[in-house]
Image (cartoon, rainbow, N blue to C red):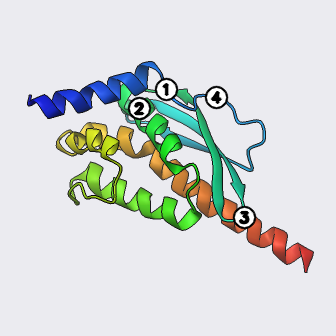
Amino acid sequence: MTDSSALYHEIILDHNRRPRNFRVLPDATVEERGLNPLCGDELTLYLRMEDDHIVDASFQGSGCAISRASASMMTTLVKGKTRAEADAMVERFRGLATGRAEMDDDLPSSLRAFAGVARLPQRVKCAVLAWHTLHAALRNESGAAREREARQR
Ligand code: ZN
């Protein structure tokens, strides 16, 4: 293990020990469940959307270190992002974790910690669980918003 991969491993352990945003969000506007049956990871993602922005994000659930650390970092990174920016980040992260894409400057450097899971196929689903759940939450939320708008007309 090189020094840098040890450092990134340490980032994952830290987020697992002290997950950020690990709480229920009482004023969430969207709530989405995610499950990775291969490992037994489960989480509930909470988002508070205002117009097109994610103003707050949190999660609850139980799972392995990689799934928890990934959810912890994801909920930290998407705060303040627009729906489109968050969706773009999901795509980038998916590429990184599956080894289809290299780390690039548009991705926050903390996510480099997950580049190594591409070499561990059984852990890829753990790493992407929170991001898949985010993608589903945004899709469902925009559908609900369109329905609300349609009703108001
Ligand atoms: Zn897992």
- For the image, the number of numbered tags is 4
Label 2 sits on residue: 69
The residue singled out by tag 1 in the image is: 19
For residue 64, say whether it is visible: no
Mark toward the start of the polypeptide (2 vs 1): 1
Amino acid at pointer 4? Arg
Circle on res. 82:
none
Label 3, label 4: how far apart the Cα atoms are: 23 Å
Spatial distance from mark 4 to mark 1, Cα to Cα?
10 Å
Secondary structure at numbered mark 1: loop
In this view, 136 is above or below 70 = below
- C-alpha distance separating marks 3 and 2: 28 Å
Q: CA distance from mark 1 to mark 3?
A: 27 Å
Quadrant location of the C terminus? bottom right
The amino acid at mark 2 is Ala
Q: Residue at x 75, y 72 (%)?
A: 146
Label located before the other in sequence (1 or 3): 1
Q: Which mark is residue 23?
A: 4
